[in-house]
Image (cartoon, rainbow, N blue to C red):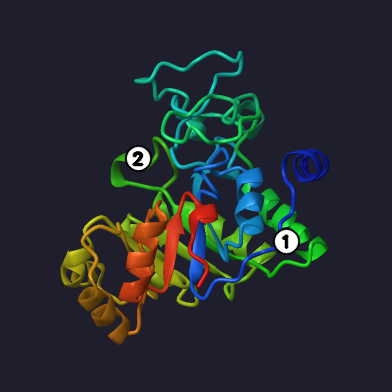
């Protein structure tokens, strides 16, 4: 599988570019979702070629216990076709990744379908890769092409209602992810992020060496969120609207980095960078201002 990716994606789909240098942490959201199918190895490589310093990605768990890249715990009808190449009804969430083996998942095409939200995406047959395969391919790619080693911003996607249905309980899910990271990369270039505070609390208590990012939707309510979490994470990562220079400065004064999501125009990126944010998470690393 890795050999096929190396030959096909590296030599045919992607052309290595001179990596732009940025004075901030440019994070490719789901790789480079605006221009490549999300959470695929080609999307990650494209993000690196465009100068991204960090690869942002999401995780799910298969029936046979593999950790794979996926934003949803099921095959999303917006981006995936079923094993016969047919559309999946939009309301259908029955293609549950936690109830499918990895071999079964490989039959789904999550790269060929037109995405109305991202019409510029390059389309091709794409599958959801294992996290361990991503690490192997990316680390080899940057080594072979003389690119800087990337950082990884890895989201554990979980919820109380999903426990035992769409994913294992938080300890099992988190333990699997931590084990793979320690086997392949280490913590000098990785942080774990989550909206699920149970994940952040478990990892801080069990693996205190792990850098954590708190994902939230309301930028201005940070004191309440920090109180709810019960400790200070390394990164505060809010939805970008509502963020102000005052909030950024207050959080940084506490020792946290501020990295908002998902910022998809050059003008929005510039405005946030002028506020002093430490990084930007974007679907379009090709639109990032170079300063």
Q: Secondary structure at mark 1?
A: helix
Instruction: Count residues near mark 2 (Cα–Cα under 10 Å), then give few for <14, some for 14-19, many for 20+.
Output: few
Residue drawn 43% across and 69% down? 279
Distance from Cα at disc 2 to Cα at disc 1: 32 Å
Q: Nearer the viewer, mark 2 or mark 1?
A: 1
Q: Is 4 situated left or right of 95 in this image? A: right
Instruction: Give residue 129's quadrant in the image.
Output: top right
User: Where does the image place residue 10, in percent across and percent down from the top left?
Assistant: 77, 46
Instruction: Give residue 189's quadrant in the image.
Output: bottom right
Foreground residue, 157 or 146?
Answer: 146
- Residue receiving disc 2: 162
Residue drawn 49% across and 55% down? 287
Q: Is 61 situated left or right of 161 in this image? A: right
Q: Is residue 144 above or below residue 137?
A: below
Q: Secondary structure at mark 2?
A: helix
How many dots with numbers?
Answer: 2
Residue drawn 34% across and 20% down? 91
Marks 2,1: beta carbons within 8 A: no
User: Where does the image place residue 124, in percent across and percent down from the top left?
Assistant: 65, 29
Q: Is residue 190 above or below residue 68?
A: below
Q: Is residue 216 above or below residue 38?
A: below
User: Where does the image place residue 164, in percent across and percent down from the top left?
Assistant: 40, 39
Foreground residue, 58 or 247?
Answer: 247
Instruction: Give residue 65's quadrant in the image.
Output: top right
Q: Is 284 situated left or right of 7 in this image? A: left
Disc on res. 139: 1
For the N terminus, the image quarter is: top right
Q: Is 2 situated left or right of 49 in this image? A: right
């Amino acid at each position: 599988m890795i050999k096929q990716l190396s030959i096909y994606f590296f030599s045919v789909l992607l052309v290595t570019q001179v990596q732009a240098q940025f004075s901030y942490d440019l994070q490719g959201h789901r790789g480079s979702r605006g221009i490549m199918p999300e959470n695929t190895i080609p999307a990650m490589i494209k993000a690196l070629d465009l100068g991204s310093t960090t690869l942002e990605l999401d995780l799910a768990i298969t029936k046979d216990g593999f950790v794979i890249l996926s934003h949803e715990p099921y095959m999303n009808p917006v981006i995936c076709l079923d094993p016969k190449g047919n559309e999946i009804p939009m309301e259908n969430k029955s293609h549950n990744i936690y109830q499918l083996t990895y071999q079964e998942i490989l039959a789904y095409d999550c790269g060929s379908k037109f995405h109305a939200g991202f019409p510029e995406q390059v389309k091709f047959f794409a599958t959801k890769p294992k996290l361990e395969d991503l690490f192997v391919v990316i680390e080899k790619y940057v080594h072979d092409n003389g690119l800087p080693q990337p950082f990884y911003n890895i989201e554990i996607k979980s919820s109380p209602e999903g426990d035992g249905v769409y994913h294992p309980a938080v300890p099992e899910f988190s333990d699997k992810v931590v084990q793979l990271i320690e086997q392949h990369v280490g913590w000098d270039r990785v942080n774990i992020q989550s909206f699920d505070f149970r994940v952040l609390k478990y990892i801080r208590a069990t693996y205190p060496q792990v850098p954590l990012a708190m994902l939230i939707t309301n930028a201005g309510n940070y004191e309440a969120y920090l109180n709810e979490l019960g400790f200070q994470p390394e990164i505060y990562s809010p939805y970008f609207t509502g963020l102000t220079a005052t909030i950024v400065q207050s959080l940084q004064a506490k020792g946290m980095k501020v990295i908002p999501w998902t910022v998809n125009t050059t003008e929005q990126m510039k405005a946030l960078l002028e506020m002093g944010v430490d990084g930007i998470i974007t679907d379009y690393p090709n639109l990032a201002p170079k300063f």
